[in-house]
Amino acid sequence: FFFFFFFFQAEDGIRDVERSRGLGDVYKRQVSTQSTWEANVYYVEFSGNDEEVMGEMEVQEIKVDEKEKLLRNEYKLDGHTFMYWEDKEERATYSDAEIVENLRLEEGEVVSLEAIWKEHKYNIEYICLLYTSDAADDMQCEDLGGRRTIKKKKK
């Protein structure tokens, strides 16, 4: 966290000797102070985690102690489905657009999230029918793939 303090001086600088207890000056007029606090900011970088990934994502800026939704996955990978984000450094996982808080605490720290993909699996069945025929061997018939034979006319 960063704290910024602005120092002040009494408006008229007159010391009230009667009420001073030796711990510092007591002033007749009210004195106001102002201090501001700014939360640290950390950054979230997103990686598609594959050379064939298409798309781009910007770096997300998040303030410490504020809840914020992670950016939605914009990456695409043919033949795959996006599963979740992984922070390998912290061994943590996050769903797409999950609300997060305090992934890091120090100013300027970077969180690297990698996309984890699931490959599409397809079950393809081929039905092959193999027809064989000895019909064409006798030179009297033509083989039409074994489905039927046609007698040749004799000449």
Image (tube, rainbow, N blue to C red):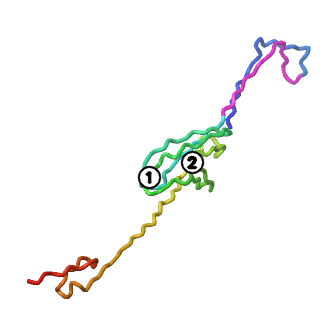
Q: Which residues are magenta?
A: 22-38
**Pointer 1 local density, CA inside 10 Å: few below 14, some 14–19, many at least 20:** some
Amino acid type of disc 1? Val
Amino acid type of disc 2? Asp
Rendering coords of residue 140 (x, y %): 17, 85
Determine whether 110 is above or below 6 in the image: below
The answer to which of 137 and 54 lies nearer the viewer is: 137
Q: Which residue is mark 2?
A: 96
SS class of the residue under badge 2? loop
Rendering coords of residue 84 (x, y %): 56, 53
Quarter of the figure with residue 100: top right
Rendering coords of residue 80 (x, y %): 47, 56
- Give the residue drawn at x 32%, y 78%: 130
Q: Is residue 28 magenta?
A: yes
Rendering coords of residue 69 (x, y %): 60, 41
Quarter of the figure with residue 20: top right
Q: Nearer the viewer, mark 1 or mark 2?
A: 2
Which residue is outermost to the left? 155
User: How far apart are the two marked residues, 1 and 2, measured between alpha carbons?
Assistant: 17 Å
State the quadrant of the N terminus: top right
Q: Which residue is mark 1?
A: 53
**Pointer 2 local density, CA inside 10 Å: few below 14, some 14–19, many at least 20:** some
